[in-house]
Image: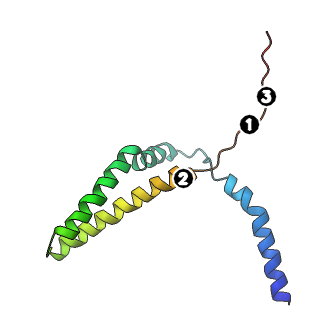
Amino acid sequence: MLKYSAFIIALALVLAVAPDALASAGSGAGLPFESWLQSLESSATGPVAFSISGIGIVVCGFTLVLGGDLPGFFRQFIFLVLVMAVILCAANIKAQFFGKGSLISLSYETTKVV
């Protein structure tokens, strides 16, 4: 019985702390290499990369289906390109459905004096 109560306490602690941990994932610490990493992420998950990954999935799929007997290295290269295209496409789809991080808004009203 002691094992189950410890598990329940640990589970309650994780559930109590999880919203704070998820909300803190939005911003960085201002490190010097953050700017170029952010631009690299924007380039890899932007609309151009999404279009290129979609085209890559179609081309690699047709190559594998209609390619016949491909040499081993070329077949592995096509699979590598296909997997990279699927990963980029999935990252973009995930970002569209779930967002990239937490958004914290300020909820105060401003009044305009006329």
Estimate the x, y position of residue 30 in percent, counting from the top left.
Answer: 59, 44
The quarter of the picture where residue 65 lies is bottom left
Q: CA distance from mark 3 to mark 1?
A: 9 Å
Q: Secondary structure at mark 3?
A: loop
Circle 1 residue? 106
Q: CA distance from mark 2 to mark 1?
A: 23 Å
Q: Residue at x 26, y 65 (%)?
A: 61
Indicate which disc, 2 or 1, sits on the residue closer to the N terminus: 2
Q: CA distance from mark 3 to mark 2?
A: 29 Å
Q: Secondary structure at mark 1?
A: loop
Q: Are marks 3 and 1 in contact (CB under 8 Å)?
A: no
> Which amino acid type corresponds to the residue marked 1 in the rendered image?
Leu
Q: Residue at x 25, y 63 (%)?
A: 60
Q: Locate residue 50 relative to residue 4 in the image: left or right.
A: left
Check the picture and name the quadrant holding the C terminus.
top right
Indicate which disc, 3 or 2, sits on the residue closer to the N terminus: 2
Circle 2 residue? 97
Estimate the x, y position of residue 110 in percent, counting from the top left.
Answer: 78, 24
Which mark lies nearer to you, 3 or 2? 2
Circle 3 residue? 109
Estimate the x, y position of residue 73 in percent, counting from the top left.
Answer: 19, 73
Q: Residue at x 80, y 69 (%)?
A: 13
